[in-house]
Image (cartoon, rainbow, N blue to C red):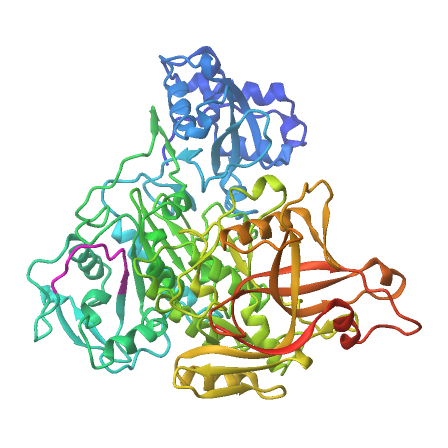
Amino acid sequence: MDRTTSSYVPSDDWEEGFVSEEQIHEAVLAAGKKAKITSLCEKCNQIVGWFFLEQEVFRRIIEIERSTHEIIHNFKIDELKPFCKLCNFLHSIWTEDEKNKNEEHFSLVRSTAGHMFGFEPFYRNERIFFLQSDGYDSEPRSHVTNVVFGFSNADAYKNGVAIRNLSLQADLILVREWIRLCDDNHVGSNFNCLPTDGVSLQGFTVIDCEDGRNILVPGTASMKYVTLSYVWGAEASEGPDQFGKLPSTLPNLITDAIKVVIALGYRYLWIDRYCIPQNDSSGIKSLLIKNMDKIYSQSILTIIATTAKCPSEGLPGITKPRIAVQKFLQMNSVRLVQWVSNIRHEIDNSVWNTRGWTYQEASLSRRRLVFTETQCYFQCDVGNSWGGEGGCRMESIDYVLTVERSYPGRSCIPTMFHSRPKDHTESDLSFFGRVVSYYTKRQLSKDSDVLPAFLGILSMFISECSNFHGHIYGVPIFEPEFAPRDTINALILGITWYCYKCLWSLEDIPAAVIPVRRRALPSWTWCDWIHASPSPYLIGWKDNTLSVRVRWRDMAPHAALSLEFEDGTILPWLPGHNSADLAKKAMMMGVVRSLHIVGWLTHLSIPHSCDHDEYFAPCGPYSIKSYEVAWLQRLARERAMNVTENKKYVFKAWVLVMVEPSGYFYDEGGEVHMMLLGETPKPSTFERFEVCMMNVKLKREGEGNSNSVEDVAKRLGWEMKAFELV
């Protein structure tokens, strides 16, 4: 790039690795003086040379200082000069974020593209600048606010990394290059960015977009097709005619998606509103919905329309102009351009990100092309890898794919979509809980869609996660890593999901959201509960609640479980049987009405009111954290529970597991985990509404290492009973 640069020649001291702040300042002044930039205030006149330094001089400064980023100057907001072009440029970037408008100071910081994007030791000469709050020695949260800027470069690959000028139209030529690079570099790797098997389903059709045909044709296993993820909206839609021909007038979003498909060199497009028969009674609609994992995971690309609230709104950058937000400053031959980097903020706050169905569409896809109001974003399955190259792309910045990032986790280009089950790095159950939590933050137009809109995710777990054997209404049947082939524990673990309510003090209780049931599914599945929309809570499973260690008293050997189906059929969930076989059989037998359980039942009494002065509150033989008692009191009031004569709320509870202390600390007390049960009109039939943990002291009676479960049950008032959980 042709820039006006200084002719400053470093002294011999620079060669020997000695340089003072005065010498650096002298080099910057020389570069600024040669540039002859007018309309600058006195302070900016002192620092403008940083943008005109020769790369060799900048390289030596970086090598000598050995610093990843350094503050150039601290600015005071009320001292910015209106006539100064550099002041105005920096101020416009800083105050763009509402959070920064009340700040009194900010700092201009220099860094390198090599450091900021994790390319070191490459691109250490490529200057990048950013703004930060004065006094904070940290790198910018680029995914939150657009505080990074650098030199514009029309040739994105000339110097390896370039901040690009965004136009009002999407650069589909660049997008096509991203896809080509993924095709060329990711095939045959450990990542499956491209479909492998194709789709062979009865009734599977795609739209033939070539030459404006726009007609449904049967899909084949070898066919390359694009999928569309969008917000359905409330608009009435006209479907294809009896010959599969789409209406002559299509919504703007559909028209734009077809244009993108053709521009990227493809021919076929799958859109649910046309490719799934909406008034079908033959079972094709149900079959296709159950196989959404295959449809999206076997597509060549998924177009994601984040901004459209309904199909009548087009894609930004196609027929609908994008919003111009990028700031720039031209100084002679140097053009400073703001990096529009907050793609995470745009996607996270989009209407598309609020909808339940769109979650699995993006999660199941292998390659995603996202349209936001400002730019395009691309992520293939390599984007979730620390060692992958080029898995995430933004239209506002580009880099050479062949240079592998040495610190990929530090890249400021965010990974927007989580990995597939086969690629994640955490425990299977933890990852499943995270996926469920992401999903429950979405909204559904119909409560009855809560399970169908997640079936594709569940199918993906079954096919890619060896420990995931199936599900019952979304309740996962995992092979416990700590107790393989323990079928009873596998089912108990699945139904004892819990919510991270973040209750740390009494002050948190009044504002906490009370869960309510949809009453479309059994109470023991997370699918039937709403914790506001979107949910503020994370859902998880404690895979160490049921254990085989000596100090844990497992209740499962004393429990018996079976499933009752809608037709009255009973499937015993027998210990020692294969969990995978039982899960498959349960999924094939139809609608589960209830769980029949034989287990330890008891009563948990908590005070109607207490002062909560102590950290733990006594509740019969148990002690519970005071703020958790306050939460249970609130639940009792919401459920209109009766208060006993001695001012207690009494919960029915199923004892799940007892954690027994051992050794020197035996008399300090153990833990008991319970599921709290709500009464129903039917005798011995309950609904689940909470799981909780409490402490209990278990003194030994005489010599011996421990008490038996029967001894503890007798002492604490547990009774082995049969009951039904609906």
Left or right? Give the position of 627 relative to 662: left
**Would you place residue 256 above or below residue 569 in this image?**
above
Q: 246 or 46: which is nearer to us?
A: 246
Residue 388 in sight: no
Magenta stretch contains residue 231 = yes
Q: Which stretch appears magenta?
A: 227-238
When asked about the image quadrant of residue 247, the answer is bottom left
**Would you place residue 497 above or below residue 81 in this image?**
below
Residue sitting at 55 percent across and 24 percent down? 134
Total residue callouts: 0
Q: Residue furthest right?
A: 703
Left or right? Give the position of 629 relative to 523: right
Magenta stretch contains residue 714 = no
Q: Residue furthest left?
A: 248
Q: Quadrant of the N terminus?
A: top left
Image coords of residue 334 (percent x, y): 37, 28
Q: 236 or 308: which is nearer to us?
A: 236
**Would you place residue 529 above or below residue 57 in this image?**
below
Residue 616 in sight: yes
Q: 196 or 532: which is nearer to us?
A: 532
Residue sitting at 38 percent across and 17 percent down? 37
Image coords of residue 723 (percent x, y): 56, 77
Image coords of residue 686 (percent x, y): 52, 70
